Image: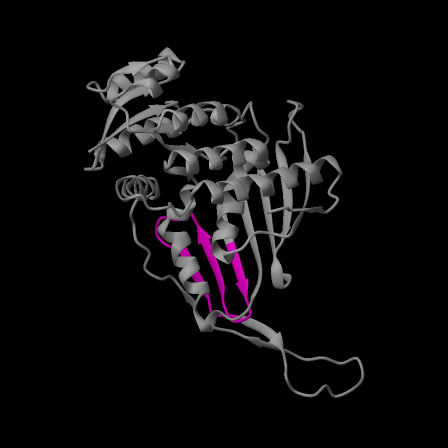
Amino acid sequence: MIHIAVVGCGYWGINYVRVFSELPDSKVVLACDTSEERLRAVRERFPLIPTTSDWEEAVNNKWVDAVVIATPATTHFAIAQQCLLLGKHVLVEKPLTTTVEDGEALVKTAQQQGRVLMVGHTFLYNPGIRKVKELMAREDFGKVYYLHATRTNMGPVRRDVNALWDLASHDVAIFNYLLDDCPQWVSAVGARVLNNGREDVGFATLHYADGVIANVHVSWVDPNKVREVVVVGSQRRVVFDDLNNVERVRIYEKGIAQSELEAGSFGEYRLLVRDGDIISPRVDTSEPLKNLGAHFLDCVAHGKPPLSDGGNGLDVVKVMTSIDQSLMQNGAPVKVVI
């Protein structure tokens, strides 16, 4: 039985309390938040779980084996570093940190302490995204042309990071997972339409090897809630729609490619357009957050590296840092140093 402390009991934190209370190999022994209102909500739903407003009390508790950190992104480093130095395993919500230097320090500390450091990139444990990766690996998918993600809604507006750090970090993790690679350089633009000192809207383009590009649009001020990832290949198009509970993944058996036939005249080229069916494959209905939690427990119990380990999370931080640099340069391309 792995004893868990959850630090930060907002939207994601209280869900972590629920998940680790339901999983058979873990027990939540302490929940922490600076908000008495949030702690009251925890006590109402989980009356047997002790609560505290002092995170240091939580991480210093000798009965705690692992700590889940679901606090604002700018606080991740200090709390996670302290946990690791105390010999605790750590699951930290995305992003791992807000600077590359802090991310590298956490990865190094986890290695030195021999502890699991995992980042909550939930979509890597989403059955729909895993189905997309499975489909991309098939020969009939063809060559990957590009990827596109849309993640928009009317809020919630964060106070510690901009919309790209808040939302696009999900899609950067998804892109890297689907392509088994990191982008070589990025370009991004954004707007501060709410005049709150950070970008509320953002557009970023990521350039991967072999000419593959990935684009993401994020917004806190869009009237439509969209959670969609599109992967376009030479033989198939695959769409993941996280808000569609009936057809979460769709396969479009349509393709367009240059003809191998000889051109009839100078400057002429031919394209072959192939129409086909739209297929909705069966997708497992398991909860991504519970899949993530079970994976974390398995890694802690058996000393295995997580799929979204500290190095994986650090790669995302490096990409997001390059996106920030491009934002400051009005969209100028910025190299990603991995």
Q: Kindly identify the residue that appears in the image at 69 percent across and 88 percent down.
A: 262
| Residue 151 showing in the rendered view | no
Left-right relation of 177 to 2: right
Query: Is 253 covered by the magenta stretch?
Result: yes
Q: Nearer the viewer, residue 180 or 245?
A: 180
Residue 27's spot in the image, x, y percent? 22, 29
Name the one closer to the observer, 99 or 263.
Answer: 99
Q: State the residue at coordinates (42%, 35%).
A: 112
* Residue 259 in magenta stretch: no
Q: How far across and down, in percent of the image, does residue 273 sit?
A: 58, 75
Residue at point 61%, 60% (across, down): 209
Q: Is residue 266 left or right of residue 34?
A: right
Going by the image, does 194 lie left or right of 24?
right
- Looking at the picture, how far across and down is residue 297, in whole percent? 28, 39
Quarter placement of the N terminus: top left
Look at the picture and state if 208 lies above or below 298: below
Question: In screen coordinates, is 19 left or right of 271?
Answer: left
| x, y percent for residue 303 | 31, 43
Q: How many marks?
A: 0
For residue 297, say whether it is visible. yes
Residue sitting at x 28%, y 24%: 64
- State the extent of the magenta-drawn residues as a range: 230-254
